[in-house]
Image (cartoon, helix red, strand yellow):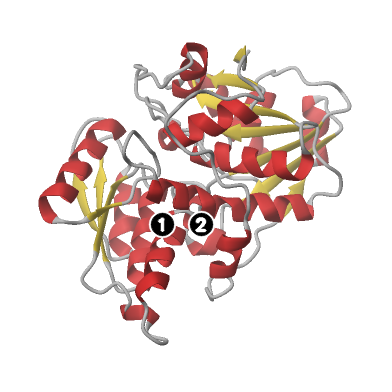
Amino acid sequence: MPVTFANPHRGRGLALDAPFPCDDAKGGADLLGQCPAHQETPLLSVPTLAAHCGVAQIHLKDERNRMGLGSFKALGAAHAIARAAWDVVEGSHWSKALAGRTFVTASAGNHGLSVAGGAALFGAQAVIYLAETVPESFAARLRAKGAEVVREGNDYEASMDAAETAAARNGWTLLSDSSWPGYSELPYLVMEGYLQLAAEAAQQIPAPPTHILLQAGVGGLAAAVAAHARKVWGNAPQIIVVEPEAAPALMESIRAGKVVDTHGPVSAMGRLDCKTPSMIALQGLARDADLFVTLSEEEAAAAVVTLQTEGLATTPSGGAGIGALLAGLDLPAEARVLAILSEGPEDA
């Protein structure tokens, strides 16, 4: 059974030195309209899964084929890079707009793919630092997008430290999907890109959801979707944030009322295995989220098996949001649930 913690800061937030997430998807939509790879992703109704979980409806926003990169993260870093290109492009020479620039980041795979894809689109270079625990399949996909891959550190935090050092040493642009004191402008733009999927889901769903389940690592996706949900539906939906039991960074920061570092074993929910939250995400979720939930390794693995039987192949990270419900999170029988399949299987 998932462990839960009700947010005592709901509606007020925390006194953090960070902006609240953007809640307006229009800016990102305007840029995406210029991208030939952009297509709306489907919102799936899964009545058999709803019956299995004892709720009225389940809708899953299916991000497994977003822009050919296999994850919602295609919307994030690529959006921030497109903003940089917009500022300097001459005429129609988009493919050379950022020639000579190098973007560097740490990633568990999908954010790196977005950096690599965005950089290539506008003529820049990408260098992606990966922890030793990241599967080689992700490293191969990054190289196929033209990125240079550097292995350093045993976890995401160590690889991010290495990326930050490399950026300072080489004059590169650090493009993280997390934020911390003194570093918020680019992560803010990354999160703004995620609003596209939230806006699509709000248009696609036949009735407002009563419950929204959002998986979180550093929290960028969850905070962006939560901010947009509050703008569209107000206080009505209960917003539930799901983290790995091994990395409850948001839950523990909410509990402490400030950013805290957490410690734990490596999680199979690799894209969510982040021990420190993004300040912007924490700022937003402290205001917008109702409940924080942790998911065990066994519960996440079981969710993948159940989703596979529904023809919804994903990973422990990709299915973690709905995984909390599958693991026994108690919702009323009349609940209308919205969740996100955030990525496809690793061997896709």
Give the quadrant of residue 271. top left
Of 333 and 231, which appears nearest the observer?
231
The residues tagged by marks 1 and 2 sit, at their Cα atoms, a distance apart of: 7 Å
Q: Mark 1 falls on what kind of element?
A: helix
Q: Are marks 1 and 2 in contact (CB under 8 Å)?
A: yes
Examine the rendered structure and indicate whether residue 57 appears above or below residue 247: below
> x and y percent of residue 83 in the render?
43, 64
Give the quadrant of residue 338. top right
Of 130 and 212, which appears nearest the observer?
212
Give the quadrant of residue 177. top left
Regarding residue 38, the answer to whether it shows in the image is: no
Q: Residue at position x 79%, y 28% from top? A: 52
Mark 1 surroundings: few (<14), some (14-19) or many (≥20) residues within 10 A: many
- Disc number placed over residue 75 in the picture, else none: 2
- Disc number placed over residue 250 in the picture, else none: none
> x and y percent of residue 265 in the render?
34, 19
Q: Residue at position x 54%, y 76% from top? A: 36
> x and y percent of residue 78 in the render?
43, 60
Determine whether, in the image, residue 56 is placed left or right of residue 186.
right
Disc 1: which residue: 114
> x and y percent of residue 49 in the render?
76, 35
